Image (cartoon, rainbow, N blue to C red):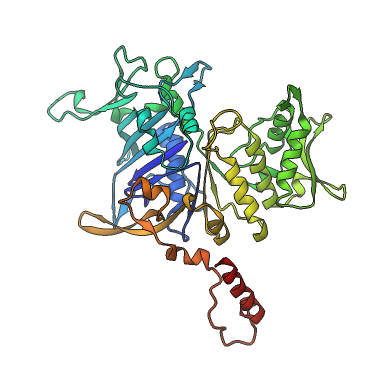
Amino acid sequence: MLTRLKVNGFKNLVHVDVSFGPFTCIAGVNGVGKSNLFDAIMFLSALADRPLMDAARCIRDEKNRSTELTSLFFHAGGSLRDEMSFEAEMLISPEGTDDLGQRAKATITFLRYSLVLGYRQGDVQHPEQLVVKKEELKHINVGDAHKLLGFQHSRAWRQSVVQGARRGPPFISTIERDKAAADETAMPRILLHQDAGGGRPRAHLAEMLPRTVLSTTNAIESPTALLARREMQSWRLLQLEPSSLRNSDFFNSPSHLGADGSHLASTLHRLARTHTSNGSHDEAAVYARVANRLSELVEDVLDVAVDEDHRRELLTLQVRDRSQTLHAARALSDGTLRFLALAILELDPSARGLLCFEEPENGIHPERIPAMVRLLKDLTVDPEEESGSDNPLRQVIVNTHSPSVVSLVDEDDLLVAEQREIALGGQRHRGVGFAWLHDTWRCRLRPSERTLSLGQLRAYLNPLAFEEPSPRTRRRVKDRDDARQMYLGFQQTGE
């Protein structure tokens, strides 16, 4: 679970410092940089899994093309700032496995990961590169957790997710450049320390690294660092594609929902086949729960199931309506499929980590947006109850333009992305900042930070502000007298 993220120098994110709870909704105008925050999270996730240059190539531009390396750095006027930094505070799982199946157990589960990357310009023989300048992984004392986790939560929940202790060195540390040295010690070195605290740390020349040190960890030497890596690898951007959601699956297909919505049928099939109630198998209960959830969006739903075609070895998700008509996934609307995918994720205890989701209101009728907001909230860990298999440590961040979504989310869950002026080198440049409402938990956590007035949300809370009708022959819907009276009635009801 990502609880705080600082970013400086990535795209238009400069001196950005944001705290997250289980659910966060980010609103903002087009082009301000909401998606850049998602890109920063996905970049960190990729860096924990891939070489530096591969991670950079996986960040896409607005046309879904691989970006140029320089486009990942902040540009001040016509010049490139050739350094970017990240700092992430996170809660990690206490246990897991490495790439070879070896068991890992964390010594402490509340960590702070820092990374500084630089840009090295290339030439004809040597292409441009990303270089590691600094990398650190430190523990956060258990006693400090209640101050840093500012969102409302119970002590029982905090004790279930913040465990262990650490008195030794950081898990990963950096020895800065020795300018007086003439040999390789003049270069910064990244040290990977053993969890036990004994033995010599493994040293790496920072600027020679093809990938982060965190991405190389294993369960034997560095179980805590490995589990931090696993946490970051679990951060996903859900881009639920209708074509993927509509596909049937083979019997031997993966049974976990892909970031694009692939393997929807096989995921539901696995959940149904493995669910037990009172010690006995209860496949029908899973299908009933999904159908009940889907009926909040589509009232005509009677049941949901997965058809098994043994001849072709295919699994096909089907929805039956109240007229007993079966509808395969390929016949369902885009909005229905997206909602269905989230409903299935909500039932999957193995779906953990951070889920980023853009514009959840897409394809949803305005009257059904409250059902989508409830579903997104239900996807997240309940911070009032102990975390476990029935309350997995799962987190959701969405961005939106929708007034309906903004008005429905809890005031504590709202962030607003806004354009800000940034002073660099005596000049002022434009970047993105994130603000929150006064008297919410982020305000109490960092009282000196700039807060958001309710008036700044006017475009979301009053989207149908009526101006005088324009002088033309045809009336718009909102210019009708009955529409104006209806809107005034809504205003009085709201007051």
Q: Quadrant of residue 476?
A: bottom right
Q: Please determine whether, in this image, residue 479 is positioned above or below residue 312.
A: below
Residue 166 screen position, x and y as percent: 35, 21
Compared across the picture, whether 357 is left or right of 121 comes to: right
At horizontal 76% and vertical 53% (from top left) the residue drawn is: 299
| Outermost right residue | 324
Q: Residue at x 36, y 14 (%)?
A: 196
Of 220 and 395, which appears nearest the observer? 395
Residue 140 seen in the current view:
no
What residue is drawn where x is 73% and y is 24%? 278
Q: Is residue 376 visible?
A: yes
Q: Is residue 130 above or below residue 326?
A: above
- Where residue 162 appears, as percent x and y from the top left, is 44, 28
Rendering coords of residue 98 (x, y %): 49, 20
Q: Residue furthest left?
A: 180
In this rendered view, identify the residue nearer to me: 401 or 464: 464
Residue 268 drawn at (x, y percent): 71, 35
Residue, x 39% and y 46% (percent of image)?
Answer: 18
Of the 4 image quadrants, the one containing the C terminus is bottom right
The number of discs equals 0
Q: Is residue 467 above or below residue 121?
A: below
Residue sitting nearer the eye, 404 or 216: 404
